[in-house]
Image (tube, rainbow, N blue to C red):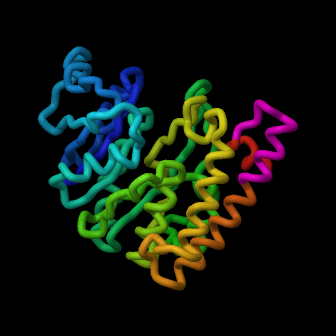
Amino acid sequence: MISVIIPACDAEATIERALTSLFRQTDGGWEAIIVSDDQRDYAAIMSGKGISDPRLRFASTGLVRSGCHHARNVGFDLISGTYVTQLDADDELSSDRFETLKPLAETYGAAADNLVMIDEETGARLGTVMEEAVPLVMLDLANFMKLNAPLVPLIRRDLVLKREPGIEFSEDVVANIQLIDRIGKLPLTASSSYLYRVHGRSMANTSGASERFERGYSEYIERLEKGDGFGLKVVNRRVAADGLIAKRALNRAFMDAQRAEPGLTFQAFVGRM
């Protein structure tokens, strides 16, 4: 079975869409753990929408806006599946995602797809992780660090680590660095089975996000170079640090461009490069 952890915060308007994409899966062997991070009763909310399924389970952080990393960890403590993945409450999956990724995750320990970014307001396709992906790419850490979009892997349970405490900005990047450190290379399919919705509330688009990313990248680089290195192998600490230094430089370039063009989004900025 696949355990899907769904953090939910102010998610009433979108979570039905996310769950509908789970109900459409051609591989129905899944459970969804919806973790409230706003003290709302999502079981009651779903019941009010006429949604009832024994595969849905509900939990809470007991807090308000404690962060996706915390909500995911609460959900992780409750999983019962052989495989683990995440789904944001405002995103959705294609119907064949689990059927496609599970055999790869069984063989390699984890697998991801060529995630597609969608503008929530217009429905326009903003791009994919790898625009010219071959049927299957074995992604090493150096090439992962060059990506400017997230990956949402399906991971064999024995290879899953909890999210790092206190890390919210780029927490998915840190988690994927740790994953690739453990498995060596991450299989990436050409199909785009994760639909990542980008909107004004997206972390990269919120006020002050660039400054917070600047602080986060600097903190993570320091930790890789002089601290615990997130538990990575020594050689991968250097690869990850170099990759984050490049990401910090890109973020700084975006900050400069945004000062001249205040309405510029990070996705649009990267698309010009």
Q: Give percent across and percent down for residue 164.
A: 40, 59
Instruction: Name the foreground residue: 161 vs 212.
Output: 212
Q: Is residue 203 above or below residue 69?
A: above
Q: How many marks?
A: 0
In the displayed structure image, the side of residue 72 where residue 81 appears, left or right:
left
In which quadrant of the rendered view does residue 131 lie? bottom right
- Image point (38%, 30%), residue name: 9
Instruction: Name the foreground residue: 13 vs 39.
Output: 39
Work out which residue is located at the far bottom of the displayed protein and give it. 235
Q: Is residue 254 above or below residue 107?
A: above
In the displayed structure image, the side of residue 150 where residue 110 appears, left or right:
left
Q: Give percent across and percent down for residue 101.
A: 35, 59
In the displayed structure image, the side of residue 165 where residue 177 appears, left or right:
right
Work out which residue is located at the far right of the displayed protein and give it. 260
Q: Give percent across and percent down for residue 176.
A: 46, 63
Q: Is residue 187 above or below residue 79?
A: below
> Is 54 colored magenta in this rendering?
no
Q: Give percent across and percent down for residue 128.
A: 59, 50
In which quadrant of the rendered view does residue 157 lie? bottom left
Q: Is residue 23 visible?
A: no
- Image point (87%, 37%), residue name: 260
Assign the N terminus to one quadrant of the image.
bottom left
Image: magenta residue range = 251-265
Work out which residue is located at the far front of the displayed protein and give it. 226
- Image point (33%, 43%), residue name: 71
Q: Is residue 150 visible?
A: yes
- Image point (29%, 27%), residue name: 39
> Is 253 colored magenta in this rendering?
yes
Instruction: Name the foreground residue: 217 vs 251.
Output: 217
Q: Name the magenta segment's main secondary structure.
A: helix
Q: Is residue 38 above or below residue 76?
A: above
Work out which residue is located at the far top of the displayed protein and give it. 48
